Image (spheres, rainbow, N blue to C red):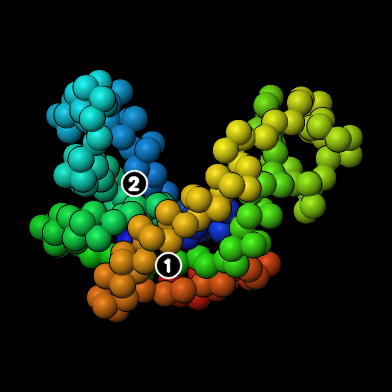
Amino acid sequence: MNLIFMGPPGAGKGTQARQIAEKYGIPQLSTGDMLRAAVKAGTEIGKKAKAAMESGGLVTDDIVVGIIADRIAEPDCKKGFILDGFPRTVAQAKALDSMLKERALKIDHVIDITCDTEALVSRITGRSTCAKCGEGYHKEHKKPAKEGVCDKCGGALTTRADDNEETVRNRLTVYDQQTAPVIGHYRHAGAFKTVDGMQEMNTVFKTLCSIIG
């Protein structure tokens, strides 16, 4: 089962992808993680990516798709995979389609987890993380017993510098502009589904499972 999970920042895409990956025994693939692993391993495509990054240039779509091609050829992807946050543009989607077709593979489901913009702003601007153990908190939904202190380990809670309202709204606007055409691409291909991310997390998970089968 080959899946693509889409969704704006804060919609819960990563959390749901991790749970689906665990349930179905397929890996969750993040392009950032794959890129770093390829560079570290010194693969042929990893060397190209490293050269691009060291020169200050962008890692091109063909390099990213090449890294995905190498990764999905590994044994743990035999039953399928989840692409988390890729493709971001129609050009990337078309490059991915071509690569998969060459390998007699296809994307079974593209699932977009949607969420109300104001809810996303509230979710993101209200979150904090323990600098010591990584436990997550929220000023409305998951408050620590003592303000600024982690319940689990006593570490200090920190907030990301870019989790301010202006930056978050800009990120959401950019996301909408970039991904709207990608949604159109997959909707035309008949592989696209939408899931309401405003529902309770377990309900979202159950809905995803019913789509995947």
Residue 164 screen position, x and y as percent: 63, 42
| SS under mark 1 | strand
- Label disc, if present, on residue 78 of the rendered structure: none
Residue bearing mark 2: 76
Q: Nearer the viewer, residue 130 or 52?
A: 52
Q: Is 164 located above or below residue 13 in the figure?
A: above
User: Can residue 180 be seen here?
Assistant: yes
Residue 202 screen position, x and y as percent: 65, 65
The quadrant of the picture occupied by the C terminus is: bottom left
Q: Quadrant of residue 35?
A: top left
Q: Pick out the residue farthest to the right.
A: 146
Q: In which quarter of the image is residue 53?
A: top left
Q: Is 86 located above or below residue 54 in the figure?
A: below
Residue at the image position 10 percent from the left and 57 percent from the top: 102
Q: Which of marks 1 and 2 is nearer the N terminus?
A: 2
Q: Nearer the viewer, residue 81 or 119?
A: 119
Residue bearing mark 1: 111
Q: In this view, does 21 lie to the left or right of 167?
A: left
The quadrant of the picture occupied by the N terminus is: bottom left
**Mark 1: amino acid:** Ile
Residue at the image position 60 percent from the left and 67 percent from the top: 116
Residue 72 screen position, x and y as percent: 26, 48
**Mark 2: amino acid:** Asp
Q: In this view, does 152 lie to the left or right of 63?
A: right
Residue at the image position 68 percent from the left and 55 percent from the top: 122
| SS under mark 2 | helix
Q: Do the numbered discs 1 and 2 sit on residues whose CB atoms are within 8 Å?
A: no
Q: In this view, does 50 lie to the left or right of 10?
A: left
- Alpha-carbon span between mark 1 and mark 2: 22 Å
Q: Nearer the viewer, residue 127 or 34?
A: 127
